[in-house]
Image: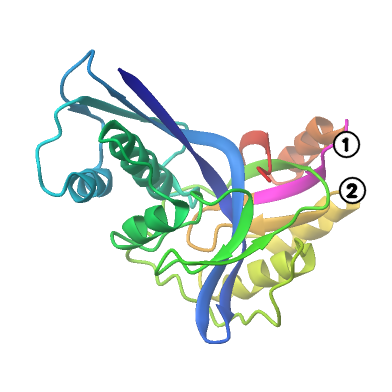
Amino acid sequence: MKITVKMRGTCGELAQGFYRGEPVLITCPIEKFSTAIVSDEFAGVFDLGSKSQAILDKVCGGREFKFGLRLTSELPRGKGMASSSADMAAVAQAVALSLGRRLSPNELGKLCASIEPTDGIFYPGVVAMNPLTGRLIKSIRAQELFQVAVFDYGGEVDTLKLNRRSDFEFPTLADEIDFTLTERSALANQSILPKRGLEDLMTFARDLGAVAVNVAHSGTVAGIFFRADDSYAAKKVAAVRRRFDFLDFMTLTRLAV
């Protein structure tokens, strides 16, 4: 028996704030993953952090887990890329499947949120959700596909210590991705977790033909969005790297819609 579960990470959030008094974030899922493997071909539990171990204990109901479990991840820690949420959700689903049960996205959301504020990577596509409860508020359509260039400002952020709340208010929750809202939310977050030269980065990216720039509201990354058919995206990334040499380029990936 071998069960493999992959959960996507994120490039921060498309937006974060409040809607009708409720904390909300709009997810920015990308094609980078945490992977949990459960098997009866090896024994022991490998590479789980404290949060993933806590999820394992919750899913098992405090009973000893009888199979082997290994967790790997493409997502760096402390960057705002949903590494903890992806780890926990992957472990929870893999373990549940080995016990004969499949967890719904809503169940995964509640489990993850019981450990820490969570990113909604267990829901398909882009969604608006409550990070404190894991509750789905709205699914959000993408009318086209996008490439995402992920840049890192450096360092790490402890998301449990950082206050994830923001004074930014959503005027409405649209049915489609609103990149204007994305950039307003990113700029509003400057008073909470400032990112050097963000407005200059937005202007430079737009001059290159990018669609928008987003940030991790409680992390160190920013994303530049290019249309999927932009064959010059790699060259434009190189131009950003030359102009903003204090940023570390991490990857050119896709928005997972």
Residue drawn at (88%, 36%) of the image: 230
Residue drawn at (74%, 64%) of the image: 199
The disc label shown at residue 230, or none:
1
Q: CA distance from mark 1 to mark 2?
A: 9 Å
Residue sitting nearer the eye, 67 or 251: 67
Give the image quarter of residue 253.
top right
The disc label shown at residue 209, or none:
2
Q: Which residues are magenta?
A: 223-231
Q: How many marks?
A: 2
Residue 79 drawn at (x, y percent): 47, 49
Q: Seen in the image, is 23 located left or right of residue 26? A: left
The disc label shown at residue 19, or none:
none
Answer with mark 1 or mark 2, whichever residue precedes in sequence: 2
Q: Seen in the image, is 158 located left or right of residue 42? A: right
Q: Seen in the image, is 148 located left or right of residue 39? A: right
Residue 89 drawn at (x, y percent): 38, 45
Give the image quarter of residue 19.
bottom right
Dot 2 falls on a residue whose secondary structure is loop
Work out whether residue 245 can be spotted.
Answer: no
Work out whether residue 216 can be spotted.
Answer: yes
Q: Are marks 1 and 2 in contact (CB under 8 Å)?
A: yes
Residue drawn at (53%, 52%) of the image: 123
